[in-house]
Amino acid sequence: MRLLDRYCLRELSIPLAYCLSGFLVFWISFDLLNDLDEFQRAHLRVPDIAQYYLVRLPELLVTVLPISLLLALLYVLGNHARHNELTAMRAAGMSLWRICTPYLVVGAVCGVIIFVLNEIVVPDAAEAANAILTKYNPKTAGDLGPDWQLGLAFHNEKDNRIWNVSAYNKRTGQMRHVAVEWRLPDGTRRRYAAESAIYTNGFWLFNGLKELHYPPEGGLPSYRGETNEMAIPDFKETPEQINSEIKFAALNEARAIKRPRLSLREILDYQRLHPTLNPRDKARLQTQFHGRLAEPVKCLVVVLIAAAFGASGARRSVLVGVAGSIFITFAYFIIWSFSFALGTGQYLPPAVAAWAPNALFALSAIIFIHRSA
């Protein structure tokens, strides 16, 4: 790494840390004032509130990181332009692309961070935050606690199996009062009813299992007795797939149009169990899929926009470059959200809805940088 690259990265690190900290403090403060009544109704103490925002921190970081990177880059590039450092670099034979290389690397690293957070941490953040909110007064599942969901109906379309569960633990995969029904190729229908079930060692273990076999021509079923404990390896459904079903069912239109909410793993799990979807659900799921892939690219697009307006500001007013860059970037985020909503509503193909804003603004910035080089 050249000395100049280290200098550029060092100059960027401090403003980026300040911008990230400032945005997070502002966001948390605003959210705290807005939800203070809800925290009081939930009887949360100060440590609980701190834990709540600690759990939500990755989700907030994904939101504020691109904007923080933009403002930090504008500050750094503005300083370079104001002190004629960009002019000196270009007089030494360095192109604008070479000057911006360390910033593009930072944008790529930030994109990787966003992707990893979205896939590993963020999908469970909402449930973890809700568990904290209901820890003293769980309302969703009686006295069982916030990890439990009552009245789960789960359809494995691929294997044509229907699960009806009285209470399901989303964290451990434990079930209470579960019934599973499916039809065999010979036309017979089977129904398993058990007092409880749990997923362990790669298969479902049923307790208090009762078997009913229905003949293909209809009529009364035959009863196969009760088994205290029985493992059924033929049931390939996993708790992760069931949780994906729950999350997709809870993904109402108002939440789905704002931004990607499901991880790629959850989307693929849902698609494996539902190979055929109606056009509305397919558009919503595919838009979530492409949106999740396109979201980390925002950091690179932001770097290109900042470079196009901030670095080229050495030839004109720095203030005009900064103002133009901020305006273009906020227009980019608005158009991206609007395009995502159109994809969710089947007005645009999902891939176009997720990727078109990235491609449009990135290409425009690249052309601008090329002309300024």
Image: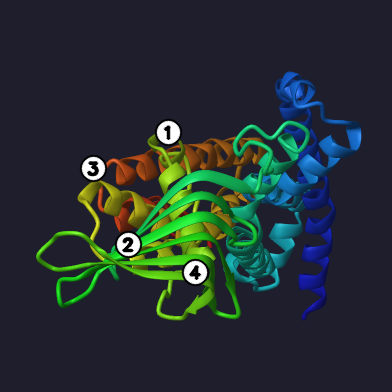
Residue at image point 60% right, 80% down: 201
Residue drawn 64% across the image and 70% down it: 101
- Above or below — where is 30 with respect to 257? above
CB atoms of marks 2 and 4 within 8 Å: no
> Residue 53 location, x and y as percent?
77, 41
Q: Which image quarter: residue 267?
A: bottom left
3 vs 2, front mark:
2
Dot 2 lies on which element? strand
The foreground one among 349 and 133 is: 133
CB-based contact (under 8 Å), mark 1 and mark 3: no
**Viewer-nearest residue: 204 or 108:** 204
Closest to the observer, 221 or 257: 221
Amino acid type, residue under disc 1 in the picture:
Ala
**Amino acid on which disc 2 is placed:** Glu
Quadrant (top left, top right, bottom left, bottom right) of the N terminus: bottom right
The residue that mark 1 highlights is 254
Q: Earlier in the sequence, mark 2 or mark 1?
A: 2
Q: Which one is earlier in the sequence, the residue at label 4 or at label 3? A: 4
Going from N to C along the chain, the mark reached first, 1 or 4, is 4
Which residue does the numbered mark 2 point to in the structure image? 181
Q: Which mark is residue 126?
A: none
From the viewer's perspective, tell me whether residue 215 is left or right of residue 300: left
Q: Residue at x 28, y 54 (%)?
A: 282
Q: Are the residues at dot 4 and dot 3 in contact (C-beta closer than 8 Å)?
A: no
On the image, numbered disc 3 is attached to which residue? 347
Q: Label 4 is placed on what type of residue? A: Thr
Q: Find the distance from the CA under tag 1 to the CA under tag 4.
A: 28 Å
The answer to whether any part of residue 326 appears in the image is yes
Mark sitting on residue 238 = 4
Residue 116 location in percent, x, y? 63, 65
